[in-house]
Amino acid sequence: METKILLENGTNELEVLEFEVAGYAYGINVAKVKEIIPYQETVPVPHSHPSIEGIFMPRDTLITAIDLRNCLERGTSKPGGLFIVTNFNKLDIAFHVDSVERIHRVSWEDIIKPGATLFNEEKGITTGIVKLEGKLVIILDFEKIVTDINPETGLRVSEIDELGTRSRSDIPILIAEDSVLLNRLIVTSLKKAGYNNLTRTYNGQEAYDLITEYKDMGILKEHVQCIITDIEMPVMDGHRLIKLVKSDEATKHIPVIIFSSLVNDDMKRKGESLGANAQLSKPEIGNLVRVIDGLVGHKE
């Protein structure tokens, strides 16, 4: 899907595709969307998850179709509607929706992260909520939906065990990841890999506020020698964080690693233009450790 947002750098904006399921408005980051196609009949897969409608093959590409109505516990979709074909974490997946409304350009600052009063943060499938043209649109966490259906598509923490016994390191690493679950899993994995000095933040703004505070106090090196950031985050996204870090003489030397489900060719070009030192897809936690080793000089 063509999108102007991919041509811009560090604006802290995204384009949200609004769609409807069971009369409710939801949204997805356009950067995840490959195309929107009319509903096609699928071939059921025996013993598959109840939210999987089946598989189909448009243009010689095998795609799994997921019934989003079923995922949202609003019944089961009937033939008709549309498929939103997505690509993230190197997977092509179609989500069955009732209709597609329009694309909105919004700032991450306008997206509200739902609090614990709405759902369990580790189990919820909502990235954020934004008010668009007078109505609330829920932006869904499609990675979490897919991981719940098939955990093998999520963070492969078993890769850390394959690295074997490693020495310990106190090199300070700052993490910006809005998913409470993924944030915890990244920290657990890095600690297992030998990195003891980890600071957790939940969006780019929190991370940048800490960086600014440490810089002003003259203790930046003691607290931040490497940054790991997601791309999609409320308030401030990872690309904006990188732009701020790499445009400041006092911080541009700090290596920044993008660890995101959105590491495709277009996003890689954007990350490179902003100065990201490395970009990895979220399942690759073992490779993340190896990249950190190379950037900060830690040896096994």
Image: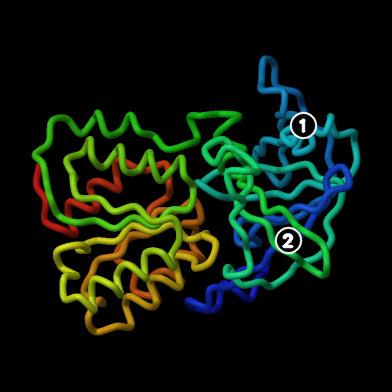
The residue drawn where x is 77% and y is 54% is 36
Quadrant holding the C terminus: top left
Image coords of residue 287 (percent x, y): 29, 45
Instruction: Give the secondary structure at mark 2.
Output: strand
Q: Amino acid at mark 1?
A: Glu
Mark 1: few, some, or many residues within 10 Å (few <14, many ≥20)? few
Provide the residue designation for mark 2: 17
Q: Above or below — where is 18 with respect to 95?
A: below
Residue 73 is tagged as 1
| Left or right: 27 as drawn, with respect to 251 | right
Is residue 260 visible to us here? yes
Q: Amino acid at mark 2?
A: Leu
The residue drawn where x is 30% and y is 75% is 212
| Left or right: 23 as drawn, with respect to 296 | right
Q: Nearer the viewer, residue 39 or 257?
A: 257
Image coords of residue 33 (percent x, y): 66, 56
Residue 214 is tagged as none
Image coords of residue 146 (percent x, y): 59, 37
Instruction: Give the secondary structure at mark 1.
Output: loop
| Left or right: 194 as drawn, with respect to 268 | left
Taking the view exactly as shown, the residue that stands out farthest to the front is: 117
| Left or right: 110 as drawn, with respect to 67 | left
Query: Marks 1 and 2, how far apart in space?
Result: 21 Å
Q: In which quarter of the view is residue 223 placed? A: bottom left
Mark 2: few, some, or many residues within 10 Å (few <14, many ≥20)? many
Mark positioned earlier in the residue sequence (1 or 2): 2
